[in-house]
Image (cartoon, rainbow, N blue to C red):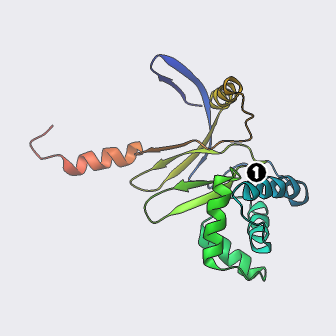
Amino acid sequence: SPTGVIGGTSLGTIAILSDDSSSLPAPIQVPTFQAFAPLCAVFRRFLKSQDLKYTQERADVLDAIIARDDAFEAEELLLDLRTRGHEVSKATVYRTLRLLIDAGIITQSLFDAKQSQYELLYGKEPRDCMVCMKTGRRVEFRSRELIELRDRICRELGWQSVGHRFQIFAIAPRVESQHESQHESPHEA
């Protein structure tokens, strides 16, 4: 496993879970019937604090997200809901996703101006990732030290951690070297 040092501080061992998400180990599974009640309550409290109602459409969106094991795009979620027979508008899906982000139930990963994915935070192990800004290649990893840092920060501020999402935007080494070789002049050696 790779190790890293930043500013003289050892980052310890980082477990590479997946390169391009093709061979991820199974995430911790939280059965829908166990996760739905607490998430439903969290979402209801959040909506009430915003003077909004917990509608059947919002409940359907949350239930469809809980049933998923992976990151998803809004259009995939909409298709999934319609396949299940739910009459939910595209606008309702997007508005509900925004509310779920604000409530801390899901996270949004922006890959570029046109593409973003969402993922359930509650009841899941953290799945941190690096995303190549040139190719979109994605490498997921887990760092014990990152989790310890998250927990320490929460403790120091009096908060209780329920999850996190750490995303690094970078350029993969192969892309950088290809990019440099394309821009070298014949006189440079």
| Badge 1: residue crowd in 10 Å (few <14, some 14–19, many ≥20) | few
In the image, is 66 to the left or to the right of 185? right
Is 45 located above or below residue 155 in the figure?
below
Q: Is residue 71 above or below residue 121?
A: below
Q: Which quarter of the rendering shows the N terminus?
A: top right
| Residue annotated with mark 1 | 26
x, y (%) of residue 98? Answer: 61, 61
Q: Quadrant of residue 80?
A: bottom right
Please give the count of numbered marks on the rendered protein.
1
Residue plotted at (77% across, 80% down): 86
| Residue type, mark 1 in image | Ala
Relative to the observer, which residue lies in front, 176 or 169? 169
Q: Position of residue 52 (x, y in %)?
A: 72, 64
Q: Is residue 56 above or below residue 109?
A: below
Out of 84 and 14, give the one closest to the viewer: 84
Q: Left or right: where does residue 127 sit relative to residue 188? A: right
Q: Position of residue 160 (x, y in %)?
A: 75, 34
Q: Residue at x 45, y 66 (%)?
A: 114
Q: Position of residue 165 (x, y in %)?
A: 62, 44
Q: Residue at x 38, y 46 (%)?
A: 174
**Which residue is farthest left?**
187
Which of the two residues, 186 or 25, is positioned nearer the viewer here?
A: 25
Q: Quadrant of the C terminus?
A: top left
Residue 54, picture quadrant: bottom right
**Furthest residue to the front?**
51
Q: Residue furthest right?
A: 33
In the shown orientation, is residue 59 left or right of residue 89? right
